[in-house]
Amino acid sequence: MADLRLGPLLRYTDGASATVWMETDGPCAAEVRCADGAGGSAGSFLIAGHHYALVPVTGLTAGTTTSYEVLLDGVRVWPLPGSPFPPSVIHAPGSEGALQVAFGSCRWAAPPAGGDDPAGPDALDALATRLAADPDGERPHVLLLLGDQVYADETSDATQRWLAGRRDLKEPPGSGVANYEEYTHLYYESWLDPRIRWLLSTVPSFMIFDDHDVIDDWNTSAAWLADMRATGWWQERLLSGLMSYWVHQHLGNLSPEELAADPVYAAVCSAPDGTGALRDFAARADADAASVRWSYRRDFGRVRLVMVDSRAARVLEEQDRAMLDPGEEAWLREQITDRGEGYDHLLLGTSLPWLLPHLVHDAEGWNAALCRGERGERWARLGEKLRRAADLEHWSAFPESFAGLADLIAEAGSGPGAPATVCVLSGDVHHAYIAEPSWTGRDPDARVVQLVCSPVHNSVPLSMRLAFRIGWSRAARGFGRLLARHGRLARLPVGWRKTDGPWFGNQLMTLTLRGRSARLRLEHAKARQGSGPGLTTLLDSELSR
């Protein structure tokens, strides 16, 4: 008899359907039964010796909440026997009422209960503690995880001990993960924490990768990629990273209709062992990034979420660098400008911030100019070294893409039928802040804000805190202008100012969207005695005009 190994995770949801993801310890028929009669079933599929199921749940009623249980081969395996948590539920969003969207990024796995946690209390752990204590209280309708769900290159002491029992850590890739099996261990470490497991079973989640899901500064430059491909371990790390992301994260972002039309999912599910089909897909994605789309769009009533892949879709040739390849850029434009019946709020998810501290922005633009040879070959060589050493690879390191996104956002927020707000949701930089752009010669009808929130659970060194505080200062802005002149950078189409922050610590932001109003709350995780970590509100303010 099969048993539940990981999950269940409540993933895609709409007013009538949902998907529930799980890993089992053997082949089985998985079933989700809801208290209101809704439900669904699916057979498991096999990847690299691991069995998974993604169960489509149908028959939900919009605007209602129902508890559910999971059965494998007819035997109930969830809720776990003696669980201290409330029943897991599926909320089917309706067209009325507010939509709460919580988001953050960069979650290093918390140690087991009672273990020392150098990163401090986990914000998702704190959210789970609050929801479990008051299951009928306010809760997010959607949880957006904006990258670095696992750290393939910065493993915990416990994981390193496990890896050392498998291979010599003195050989590359050292203490980082090397293959699919080792990736699965990262997901166990991250998602088997009891509070996190329950939270992800009852709050729908949507995800996108960032660099640490594969390796720090993934796809920084063409020269970086050539160096990685010359190693003996990179190919297996990358293919395993894409395969494990597809299984654990990407599938749950898709609607049941998209899953039914996905040829890779069909091939994996129809084969006795789907490993070969999935590995071939990952190899095609590596060979031609434009052949795969990891980005996706979700509409929650009159709220549109467009989640953008700002890692794998890059064009890295030095004279033609772009954050998004032409097909991805055209897709993004279509999702944003196709208003259909209209939307009141546009959420643009990109793991990397669009608007950074001014000094960081100018340093990245200057560095990009050096690397493409604006100041000659010697400066280009220096620029590549600086780019890798200082992580200069955000939107501002792709100047034409930065300007193109600025124009697209202004267009999205202007004219008849414009939304009330355009919110760019990002993480990555291990602090939180709000920045507001302004355009020369145009004033969008929507209020446009950059909202950055990270980490959910990770350390923030003092050097990083000082660097970002300085980066926002007036003096730093002046130095940035000198770098821009040296790099002969074009005039920017948009300016911006920091309106709140920076905040440091483990944290979550939550948007509450009701009609054309939007409210933002920022909460920090705080240690408490006995009952688990709590959340303290640092900001609660109106966003809409």
Image (tube, helix red, strand yellow):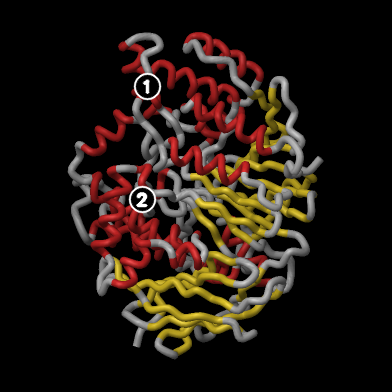
Residue 43 got which mark? none
Instruction: Identify residue type, mark 1.
Output: Gln
Disc 1 packing (10 Å; few <14; some 14–19; many ≥20)? few
**Would you say 452 lies left or right of 368 here?**
right
Mark 2 crowd level (few <14, some 14–19, many ≥20, 10 Å Cα)? many
Residue 119 visible somewhere in the drawing: no
Q: Secondary structure at mark 1?
A: helix
Task: Estimate the spatial distance between the alpha carbons at disc 2 and disc 1, rounded to whole Å.
Answer: 30 Å
What x and y, as percent, mark residue 204? 58, 65
Foreground of the two, 514 or 126: 514
Label 2 amino acid? Ala
Question: In the image, residue 70 lies at what x, y percent?
Answer: 49, 82
Q: Quadrant of residue 480?
A: top right
Left or right of 274, for residue 122: right
State the count of labels. 2
Quickly name the residue at label 1: 319
Disc number placed over residue 152 in the picture, else none: 2
Q: In the drawing, does residue 383 fall left or right of residue 240?
A: right
Q: Is residue 193 above or below residue 495?
A: below
- Residue at the far right in the pictured view: 545
Q: Quadrant of residue 431?
A: top right
